[in-house]
Image (tube, rainbow, N blue to C red):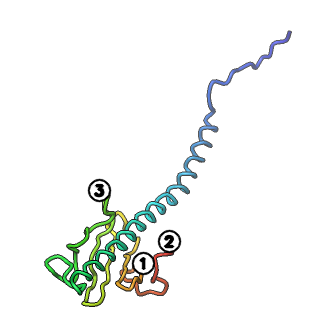
């Protein structure tokens, strides 16, 4: 029976193995975090879109009762914070990411807006009007008049 002179047992990881593991975890985190954050932003935007659609339905009911869209904002105003619908989105959550306002209202039409709050900055305003036209300020320049910003389907 021969004995091996170099019979050392491994009792753990080498420094090189640990460094490779740390690098791999770092790369995964660097790639995964932005993707995760974009998913969160999209889900918050979807909540705001749902809130605006419900708000538009509420405005339609208001018109049925009053024969006008005007006067649904605070103090009977035609624009500003609504009195007939919650002023923030998501409606059923503690943390709010969008402010909901009546951007314009007349006897025959309205435009509603969801404006991102600080935690949602860079996500662009959302709008819907009484004709059902939906707009999203995708490039976040403060208006929805640019080419291609006339729907909610992108992003």
Query: How many residues crowd around disc 1 within 10 Å: few (fewer than 14), some, or many (20 or more)?
Result: many
Q: Sequence order check: which comes first, mark 3 or mark 2?
A: 3
Q: Front-most of 29 and 103?
A: 103
Q: Front-most of 118 and 152?
A: 152
Residue 155, disc: 2
Report how far apart the C-alphas of labels 3 and 1 lie in the structure.
24 Å
Is residue 105 toward the left or the right of residue 122 in the image? left
Secondary structure state at the residue bearing disc 2? loop
Q: Are marks 3 and 1 in contact (CB under 8 Å)?
A: no
Q: Are marks 1 and 2 in contact (CB under 8 Å)?
A: yes
Q: Front-most of 67 and 41?
A: 67
| Pair 3/2: label in front | 3
Report how far apart the C-alphas of labels 1 and 2 lie in the structure.
10 Å
Secondary structure state at the residue bearing disc 1? strand
87, above or below 21, in the image: below
Q: Sequence order check: which comes first, mark 1 or mark 2?
A: 1
Q: Which residue is mark 1?
A: 136
Q: Are marks 3 and 2 in contact (CB under 8 Å)?
A: no
Q: Furthest residue to the front?
A: 65
Residue 94, disc: 3
Residue 111 position in % (x across, y down): 32, 83
Q: Furthest residue to the right?
A: 1
Report how far apart the C-alphas of labels 3 and 2 lie in the structure.
25 Å
Would residue 122 be visible to someone looking at this image?
A: no
Is residue 13 toward the left or the right of residue 101 in the image? right
Residue 24 position in % (x across, y down): 60, 47
Would residue 114 be visible to someone looking at this image?
A: yes
């Amino acid at each position: 029976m021969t004995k091996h002179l170099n019979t050392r047992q491994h009792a753990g990881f080498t420094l090189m193995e640990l460094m490779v593991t740390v690098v791999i975890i770092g790369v995964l985190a660097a790639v995964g975090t932005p993707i995760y954050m974009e998913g969160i932003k999209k889900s918050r935007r979807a909540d705001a879109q749902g809130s605006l659609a419900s708000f538009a339905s509420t405005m339609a009911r208001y018109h049925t009762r009053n024969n006008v869209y005007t006067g649904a904002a605070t103090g009977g105003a035609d624009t500003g914070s609504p009195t007939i619908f919650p002023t923030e989105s998501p409606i059923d959550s503690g943390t709010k990411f969008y402010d909901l306002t009546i951007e314009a209202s007349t006897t025959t039409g309205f435009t509603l807006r969801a404006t991102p709050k600080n935690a949602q900055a860079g996500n662009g305003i959302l709008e819907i009007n009484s004709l059902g036209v939906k707009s999203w300020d995708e490039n976040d320049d403060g208006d929805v008049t640019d080419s291609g910003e006339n729907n909610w389907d992108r992003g």
